[in-house]
Image: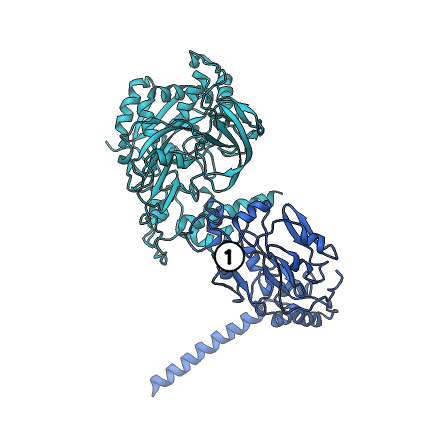
Chain colours: A blue, B cyan
Amino acid sequence: MSTTLVSLISMGMVGSVLAAGLVYASKKFAVETDPTADEIEEVLPGANCGACGYAGCRAFAEAAADGKAPVDGCPVGGVTVAKLVAQILGVEAVEGTHRKVAQVLCKGGRAEAKLHAEWIGPRDCRVAQNTQNGSFKACSYGCLGLGTCVAACPFDAMYMDENGLPVVIEEKCTGCGMCVRACPRDIIVLAEEPQGVHIRCRSLALGKDVRGVCSVGCIACRRCEKECPVNAITVEDNLARIDYDKCINCRRCVAVCPMNTIEYQEGKPVLKKKRAS
Amino acid sequence: MSLKTFFGGIHPKYAKELTAESPVEILSAPETVVVPMLQHIGAPAVPTVKKGDEVLAGQVIGEATQPVSAPVHSPVSGKVVAVTDRPHVNGRSVLSVVIENDGENKWVELEPHPDPVQLDRSVILDKIRAAGIVGMGGAGFPTAVKLRPPKDAAIDVLLINGSECEPYLTSDHRLMLESAADVILGAKLLAKACGAKKIVIGVEDNKRDAVAELKKHAGAIEIVLLDTKYPQGGEKQLIKAVTGREVPSNGLPFQAGVVVQNVATAAAVAQAVRDGKPLVERIVTVTGSVINEPRNFLVPIGTPLHNLIEAAGGFTEEPGKVLVGGPMMGMAQHSLDAPVVKTVNGILALSKGEAVVPEPLPCIKCARCVDVCPVYLLPLRLEAFGMHEMWDEAKEYGAMDCIECGCCTYICPSKRPLLHYIRVAKNQIVAMSRKQGN
């Protein structure tokens, strides 16, 4: 009897002393947190992807609470989160923030673009680009097709197709830009949602050189430039470039492109003018 | 007596017997030579000729306009047919002068000097610069720039690198055997140019015949036998082995009071100063298991790689991989149209079976890469940092000190691509510091 009692009492006493210590410590050494930042962190996606430019969601929440970061600074959360953050901070949400989606600006997969040799090293574009400039692929500007962007995507929004090109699943893409940073050849860009027309080539090589290595590359023939009714396309350094702010998605360039480099992505409203920036 | 050496390193299969006994054969220039303007580290040379111009052998066709650069000379006499981008052994397209060989081999007038050792330091330096000499061991750093370190650096030792630690290659070995006098004269001139009092030639002990040959001409020059171990010919490893001095982290050899030059560079310097002949030819080893008759050639710069392979009897079977350089640090080629440049010391063709890259397995932390790293790094950690984009950590762990010898990747029992990712990290660190500098 006495053993049980003694142990109960002694353990109980030790317990209460330690508990008192803990209570004191939690009061005395409490870390002050900004309640607004806590609230903002609650509504953020919590992916900690870093697309906002801060070291994770908490850092962004603190910056937003201090007014250092814009309320629509989270590209992953988009309009919904921007509105919630604005509500918490008691400011007006900026209307018309568009969702950004990653676009792969190369159509030269295994079927279209020539390979000089077979790549037998690690399946990583960064390594391949470091090895003789990725010259196993004949085009020195195009997609190396080893899937570094897919591995970098934190939202599972990309996959490699059978042709060896990355494909963005638009519904899943949050526009965080991790793939853009991962690509050693800079062929992925972020485009705002209603944009449907894309020039899918980054090659600065001369037209005849492009023809020699790829069947879908831009040869800088300038037909799109002439066709465009709003002067959204300019040809510079042997490459047609499109100004997404000017483009009205009329698709006339898509029709005239002899190499099928310019593409219209289905499922977008046609001829809808975007917000004036 | 144990031989001098450095910490770490590996003992790969050397396979030098394929070509070690084959004397250097002179290969005449092909009908068309392609001379790239970039054959060295630094700024490319600027072409001084245009399409349609007639050129003589030894004539300057590209001049150095930047401090770190080297002029380029025509290896043949003939007509310039194009000045355009052409494939280069580095995998890029580089501005090159394409010359149609008229077969007459007419040379510009050379300025020989019968007693070159008596020349002034500045005259020797000028002649080396004008001859377009660059480090011929592989890196291609302009020799004249390397001979003039900052004013406060006191150079007391000139090290001539005859170790040729890359497996398969024997071009330096044959050079030492056949042109030992040139190597010794070049060493004396180089020592005068950089102000070094002492000259040491380091040779691996698998080339004792070359040492004997050098000793016949050496005089006061010391010749040191080194352990046969890769990368014995690495600049910093050679300095450690021969002098016991260590080049500081992120530092250059002059900080240890040493200038290192390759034997081929020394021979080229001798020819430039004594005969006035610019650097327009070099010895190239053509070897590998799928080469019919592996051998050594003295070829004009600008000869396409396929000409050399044809001269060596072609391939016995379709190669799995063709490298320029040795198997450890060589560069894989996708096309045999690229020309020989000043830094090409060998062409190695491997069979399909030899060229297989095994699937990597997880790192088992056995630390064998740490044991062999000649610069005391932790390759396993650096690989992880490179793979996961932890650039700051990679820098902290000394990624920039990596000499890219590939010992870690060679020794790894899991066949991990260690060096591949250390290179990714190094490139990123350089890009980041450039961005911060702007």
Q: On screen, B125 above or below B346? A: above
Q: Residue B407 sits in which quadrant?
A: top left
Image quarter where the C terminus of chain B lies is top right
Query: Where does the image place residue B26, in percent across and percent down from the top left?
Result: 36, 26
Q: Residue A245 sits in which quadrant?
A: bottom right
Query: Where does the image place residue B77, in percent across and percent down from the top left?
Result: 48, 23
Image quarter where the N terminus of chain B lies is top left
Which residue is the extreme one toward the left? B1
**Could you tell me which residue is drawn at 49 percent across and 48 percent down?**
A138
In the image: residue A132, left or right of residue A68: left
Name the foreground residue: A42 vs B74: B74
Query: Where does the image place residue B159, in percent across and percent down from the top left?
Result: 39, 27
Name the foreground residue: B105 vs B327: B105
In the image: residue B53, left or right of residue A116: right
Name the foreground residue: B271 vs A176: B271
Dot 1 crowding, Cα within 10 Å, few <14, some 14–19, many 20+: many
Q: Which residue is mark 1?
A: A109
**Could you tell me which residue is drawn at 57 percent across and 45 percent down?**
A208
Q: On screen, B250 above or below B390? A: above
Callout 1: helix, strand or loop? loop
Q: On screen, A55 above or below A114? A: below
In the image: residue B410, left or right of residue A263: left
Residue B315 can be seen, yes or no: yes
Query: Where does the image place residue B330, in percent across and percent down from the top left?
Result: 40, 40
Q: Residue B166 sits in which quadrant?
A: top left
Label 1 marks which chain's residue? A
> Disc 1 marks which amino acid?
Gly
